[in-house]
Image (cartoon, rainbow, N blue to C red):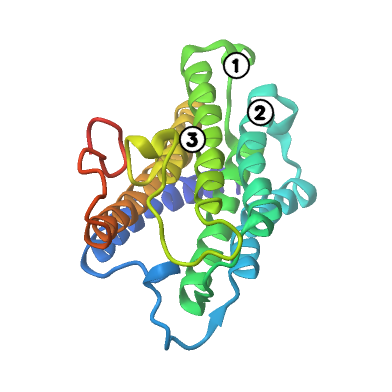
Amino acid sequence: MEPAERFLLDRLAYLQCAMSLLGFVLLRLWRSCYGRYVSPGSAFRVPARAAWALQELPSLAVPLWVCTVTAAERLHRAPNRILLAMFLVHYAQRSLIFPFLIRGGKPMPLYTFALAFMFCGYNGYLQSRYLSQYAVYADDWVTDPRFLVGFCLWLIGMLVNIHSDHILRNLRRPGETGYKIPRGGLFEYVTAANYFGEVVEWCGYGLASWSVQGGAFAFFTACILFTRAQQHHQWYLEKFEDYPKFRKIIIPFLF
């Protein structure tokens, strides 16, 4: 059973890479449908706070379920525990804290919500099952340069993501409406500073885990968020004549 499941987890990771490429192509052809891009007449929409909380929750709940009902033999090793904790900390913030900080927020189309919900369940199982049952690390892996650099990137990326979300939430003063150009932090250099932070975060996680599963998730994040960042960048350029032309899309000084 174990070799068969390990084989399955590897195939699920490769499938995630394929989904990344497919999503990249589709989102280049058709715009993402959420937030400011949702048509006012769209039916079957989920309130913003509920959508964000529920769609991200499987990435927290599924790993906790996996670790509770299975042997989770590898979690007695420090590297496995730390890596799984990195994953869970992010999604605890995204599902239990971030949604309740949203001010207003546009309802999300039901199909967008459903796709995100299914992906979070899929990825939550993939990452947690691999780390809790099959990932083998030496006891000194936490001192390996790949782990140390990856952990630092994960932490920096998460802090950038949280700070950038804070800037976006506070663009408008109470009672104000309409859109504004984000200022401060990495928004001085890129349009999608929040996405940049999340890409750095999961690339760090992928490096620290040094696994196909972690790498596949990092690749998926980069593919999907890069297309969304391009969409945001083009929207700002069309919306604001004074939008800083030197700002890159998502990666400072590059793209």
Distance CA(mark 1)–CA(mark 3): 17 Å
Residue with the mark numbered 2: 82
Give the crowd class for mark 2: few <14, some 14-19, many >=20 residues within 10 Å. Answer: some
Residue with the mark numbered 3: 201
Question: Dot 1: what SS?
Answer: helix
Write the residue at 42% across / 50% down.
Answer: 11
Distance CA(mark 2)–CA(mark 1): 9 Å
In the image, 86: left or right of 4? right
Residue 68 x, y percent position in the rendering? 79, 48
Depth-wise, is mark 1 or mark 3 nearer the camera? Answer: 3
Question: Dot 3: what SS?
Answer: helix
Residue 106 x, y percent position in the rendering? 52, 71
Residue 245 x, y percent position in the rendering? 20, 43
> In the image, which disc is placed on residue 142?
1
* Amino acid type, mark 2: Ile
Distance CA(mark 2)–CA(mark 3): 15 Å
Of the numbered discs 1 and 3, the one sitting upstream in the chain is 1
Which of the 4 image quadrants contains residue 185?
top left
Of the numbered discs 2 and 3, the one sitting upstream in the chain is 2
